[in-house]
Amino acid sequence: MRLLEQIQKVSNELIIGLVGAVGSSLNILTATLTDLLETEFAYDVEIITVSKDILAQHVDEPAHPLNAFERIYRYMDVGNQLRHDHDTDFLALQIARLIAKHRQAWQAQHPDQDASQRRVAYIIDSLKHEAEIQALRQIYTNGFFQLSLYESKTARHSSLIQHYGISPESARILIERDEGEANAYGQHTSEAFHLADYFLKLDKYNPEQSRQPELELRASCLRFLRILFADPYITPTFNEFATYMSFTASVRSADLSRQVGAVIARNNTILAVGSNDVPKFQGGTYWPYLDDETGEVRDLESGRDFMRGFDANTIEKNKIIDDLFQQLAEVIDQSVEQERTAPLKLQIQQILKESKIKKITEYGRVVHAEMDALLSCSRSNISTQGATLFVTTFPCHNCAKHIISAGIEKVVFVEPYPKSKALMMHEDSIMQKWEGREAADQPKLIFEPFVGVGARSFVNLFSVSLGIGRKLKRKSKDGYVLQWDGKTAQPRLPMYGQSYHELEQQIEQLLKDQN
């Protein structure tokens, strides 16, 4: 044992945060994880339901019983208000307080045992804002894991209608609100979803599938837990590898709005990568370069947008809004009483700013990641016929038409992109296979969600020695394969119970004792 290991307090606790859009079957995911943790890994499970354990405490008693739509909508309002009144991470801090209370209660019942050594997992159902996830990662560091469950909009819409008795129109309202509100304190499920350590999918839309989707979900959950508990014999699937490569490609982007990456592959071979950045003469996009005279790494003047100092797309959108506003203002001045013109103009200006104009992307200088990858193949005379595109974000409708034309057969995406009109505009050529529509009159391009280890945890969970967790061993000194047992295995990424200040003090004492 190393000296440091003698004083470090390693906890066996796990904090698992669930993210899923409204209507998702998070109850099935929670039950599946609970069963696997208890039976396969000898772990206790404690569940924290945010709506019941936190939000319900802040809901005023209604004058009349609420139906399902009113209850869900009211809870969304309460969550938004709490984030507004306190801050965006308020619910995460409330969750941490509840976990501490659970731990204290268990310790009181087991005074002869150390609560930090208890094999226990706290499952949080569910998180709706990226700030909540960031806060829980800060509090619990390596002990926090986010699981994001994907279910198609069709399946969730059907679930809200069938299981909650909500009308189709009310279900649509809930789904659209949940995807992402412009309000900084609102529902940000889309922004939180892609931050996951592991991605799962479940769709019960097709009744002919019976329990098959749930069995697939259970298998995915078991694989995640085996990886989490350091099973040394689980390696990445090609989908996980290619998706990780797409995220690796994305980080080279200097776009002012977002980083997106793409990979084109066929027969488990990477053909090209792409990222969203500004195109350059002679092909490709800009890279920083080494200045031989100064030894500095530089960017070309007026090349990428940050060197020019502005986002052309935002500037042009604002010009459109200003132009429309000026034309409307002239009409208002001519037809509305003078004392009413000022407030009316302010209202119209705000409406224009929040309109669909803000979703326009065509004035940007950057090449989208999908197009960058496709053009890379074109420059190298590589056919994309029958290939698969792995992309960090659901393709926009502009990219979708080129993906179809390029002969791509499948698109695997991570982050949903509500602004995309791809499915609406190209339903003749694009099929959402997981929505129970596997049978089609003609072959179509398949869009499907990514399932597996997220890019943020890829190295930590798969690398034998390069991650921040325990090193993996696969064989004995005699050369025989080591056996792995989930019921005694410890988490791959240990959560330590001391701050670095406490460790420094204990190190000082340890070194004194060594002398």
Image (tube, rainbow, N blue to C red):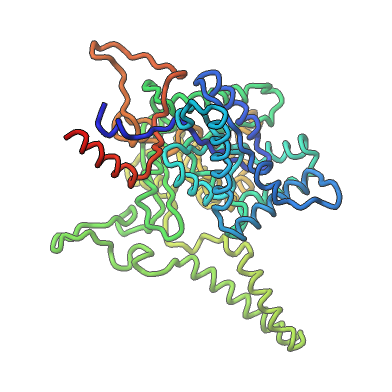
Total numbered circles = 0
Could you tell me residue 52's position as x and y percent?
69, 41
- The residue located at (61%, 53%) in the rendering is 180
- Quarter of the image with the C terminus is top left
Could you tell me residue 389's position as x and y percent?
46, 39
Q: Quadrant of residue 158?
A: top right
423 sits to left or right of 505:
right
Instruction: Answer yes or no: is residue 431 visible.
Output: no
- The residue located at (57%, 39%) in the rendering is 101
292 sits to left or right of 234:
left
Instruction: Answer yes or no: is residue 451 visible.
Output: yes
Could you tell me residue 162's position as x and y percent?
77, 35
Q: Is residue 302 above or below residue 261?
A: below
Could you tell me residue 225's position as x and y percent?
48, 26
Q: Residue furthest bottom?
A: 338
Q: Is residue 408 above or below residue 225?
A: below
**Of residues 90 and 27, which is closer to you in this image?**
90
- The residue located at (63%, 22%) in the rendering is 212
Q: Is residue 397 above or below residue 226?
A: below
**Of residues 307 and 271, which is closer to you in this image?**
307
**Of residues 450 and 192, which is closer to you in this image?**
192
- The residue located at (29%, 44%) in the rendering is 505
